[in-house]
Amino acid sequence: MGLISFIKNAGEKLFKSGEKGEQEKAELIRTHIGRFGFDTSRIQVTVDKDRVILSGTVDTTDNKNKVIVTAGNVDGIAAVEDRIVVTEPVRSAPPPPEKQFYTVKKGDYLSKIAKEVYGNANKYHIIFEANRPMLKDPDLIYPGQVLVIPPLEE
C-alpha cells in the first residue's frame, strides 16, 4: 500500500478535452483496466484531480502491481494511491518479495533496463512478461511509462 508516482503527461490517452468529471474519469480507468483482462468486479476506482485511488481486493500480488501500472500509465494521472488488498491463499513459505517499479526514460529499451536492474541485458523478457498484457511488443515502450520490475528468481 502506498503512493506510486507517474509522469502526468505520458501514457494512454483516455480523457478527451472537456471530460465531464472525476467520476467519469474513474469509470474510464476502470474500463481501461478491464480491457487488459483484469477482474475489476472487486476494485473500486476513484479519481481526485490527477490522482487515482484504487481500493478493493485482487487475487495476487502480481495482478495488483499490473493493475496499479495500468491505472497510472494514463495521460493526466500523476499518482496512484494503492489501497488494494491481496487475497492470495496463506502459504507456509514467506511471501514473494514486492516488485519494484521503473519509470522509462528517453532512450530506454527493455534490454537496457534489464542490464541496469539485473546486470544482464538478456533478461529483458522477464520484464516484458511481467508487464503483459499492457505491453504487446518488447520494442514498444515510451518515456514516462512505469513498468513492473520483478525480482529475479534464483
Image (tube, rainbow, N blue to C red):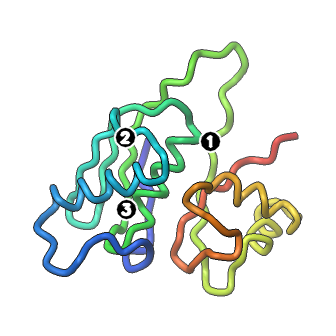
Q: Please, what is the three-letter code of the amino acid marked with disc 3?
A: Ala
Q: Nearer the viewer, residue 15 or 82?
A: 15
Q: Which image quarter: residue 56?
A: top left
Q: What residue do we see at 80% from left, 71% from top?
A: 111
127 lies left or right of 37? right
SS class of the residue under badge 2? loop
Residue 79's disc number: 3
Q: Nearer the viewer, residue 146 or 97?
A: 146
Residue for badge 2:
40
- Alpha-carbon distance for marks 2 and 1? 22 Å
Residue 126's disc number: none
- Alpha-carbon distance for marks 2 and 3? 19 Å
Residue 71: percent from left, percent from top = 40, 57
Mark 3: few/some/many CA within 10 Å (<14, 14-19, 20+): many
Q: Earlier in the sequence, mark 2 or mark 1?
A: 2
Front tag of 2 and 3: 2
Q: Earlier in the sequence, mark 1 or mark 3?
A: 3
SS class of the residue under badge 1? loop
